Image (spheres, helix red, strand yellow):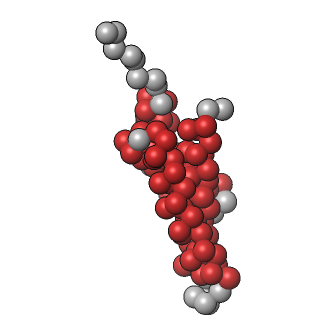
Amino acid sequence: MPTNWLYIVAATGLALLGNAISLLWATDESKYSIWLLLTVLISPLVFLSFGLAASRSGLAVAAGTIDSLLTIGTIAVGLVLFREWNGLSPYQYLGLALAVAGIFLMLTPVPQRGG
């Protein structure tokens, strides 16, 4: 796995974890819980990991890839862990499939110009 991919996967994983933890905090009766502490601790790591990924692959590729992976991952967490299967329409499932296709297109190598 190329180094750029490792940074992209790490940044996406941290952001996905942050999203899930912040939802657990927001839905908890007590707003002053361990979920609040974890949300506050992980948030800076999300931004730092994004910056590291963007410094290696450029902002356009990093943002496009990480944001698409994060969208797909967050939807998967919502569908599987929070049982939100009935919350998506067929059009939204189509959008999810197009996001997956977009990831592959964003990571297609740029052809080198002859010179």
Count of marks placed on residues? 0
Q: Nearer the viewer, residue 113 or 15?
A: 113
Position of residue 79 in the picture relative to residue 54 (left or right): right
Residue 111 seen in render:
yes
Q: Position of residue 14 (x, y in %)?
A: 60, 58
Q: Nearer the viewer, residue 43 or 54?
A: 54
Quarter of the image where the N terminus is located = top right
Q: Is residue 103 above or below residue 82?
A: above
Q: Residue furthest top?
A: 114
Q: Residue at x 48, y 30 (%)?
A: 107
Quadrant position of residue 21: bottom right
Q: Is residue 88 above or below residue 48?
A: above
Q: Is residue 95 above or below residue 1?
A: below
Position of residue 60 in the picture relative to residue 65 (left or right): left
Q: Position of residue 50 (x, y in %)?
A: 49, 54
Residue 96 seen in render:
no
Q: Residue at x 46, y 39 (%)?
A: 57
Q: Nearer the viewer, residue 30 or 51?
A: 51
Q: Position of residue 110 (x, y in %)?
A: 40, 23
Position of residue 34 in the picture relative to residue 113 (left or right): right
